[in-house]
């Protein structure tokens, strides 16, 4: 063997080793890409499930609110029917008075409307200071005397 043959063997073996290392690196890189694609797919599926649950929950609350409104209307109708029947058929005056006291008055209705309107107003978070004060407990100079505002110098 001469020197030229040895150089060709080194070039070919270096090429084969480089190709092998490149293929190994490509395989390792593709494994993480495939895993990222799988994770993205799972994330998309979870988002779809979450959106479906939210829609189902909204639908549930809507049906429940409709059912409660229907029950409330039926209850009011039954109370009115009982009052009407009791006033027409009953001779017991105390029973008729008790039933008439159950009927909501206009002031009760106005108080209920005011309470529901008040509940719909946005709630302001609590402050760390009184409304007429400019400084709160979270201010940097809270609790410091007026003459001690500067930090000590060393």
Image: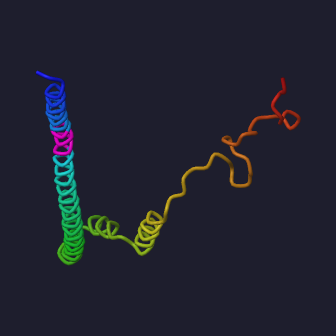
The C terminus is located in which quarter? Answer: top right
Q: Can residue 29 be seen in this view?
A: yes
Res. 95 image quadrant: bottom left
Numbered disc total: 0
143 is higher (above) or lower (below) than 106: above
Please name the residue shown 19% across and 37% down the image.
22
Q: In this view, does 149 lie to the left or right of 70?
A: right
Res. 148 image quadrant: top right
Position of residue 139 measured from the top left corner of the image (x, y, whole percent):
70, 43
The verdict on residue 32 being magenta is yes
- Please state which of residues 92 and 22 is positioned toward the viewer in this rendering: 22
The majority secondary structure of the magenta stretch comes to helix
Please name the residue shown 69% across and 50% down the image.
130
The N terminus is located in which quarter? Answer: top left
Res. 11 image quadrant: top left
- Please state which of residues 95 and 121 is positioned toward the viewer in this rendering: 121
């Amino acid at each position: 063997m001469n020197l030229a043959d040895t150089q060709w063997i080194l070039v070919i073996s270096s090429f084969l080793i480089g190709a092998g290392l490149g293929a190994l690196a490509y395989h390792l890189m593709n494994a993480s890409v495939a895993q990222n694609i799988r994770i993205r797919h799972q994330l998309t599926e979870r988002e779809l499930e979450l959106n479906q649950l939210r829609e189902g929950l909204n639908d549930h609350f809507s049906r429940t609110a409709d059912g409660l409104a229907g029950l409330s209307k039926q209850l009011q109708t039954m109370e009115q029917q009982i009052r009407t029947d009791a006033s027409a058929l009953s001779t017991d005056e105390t029973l008729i008075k008790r039933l008439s006291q159950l009927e909501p008055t206009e002031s009760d209705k106005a108080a209920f409307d005011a309470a529901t309107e008040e509940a719909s107003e946005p709630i302001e978070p609590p402050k760390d200071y009184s409304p007429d004060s400019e400084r709160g407990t979270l201010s940097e100079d809270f609790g410091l005397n007026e003459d001690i505002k500067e930090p000590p110098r060393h």
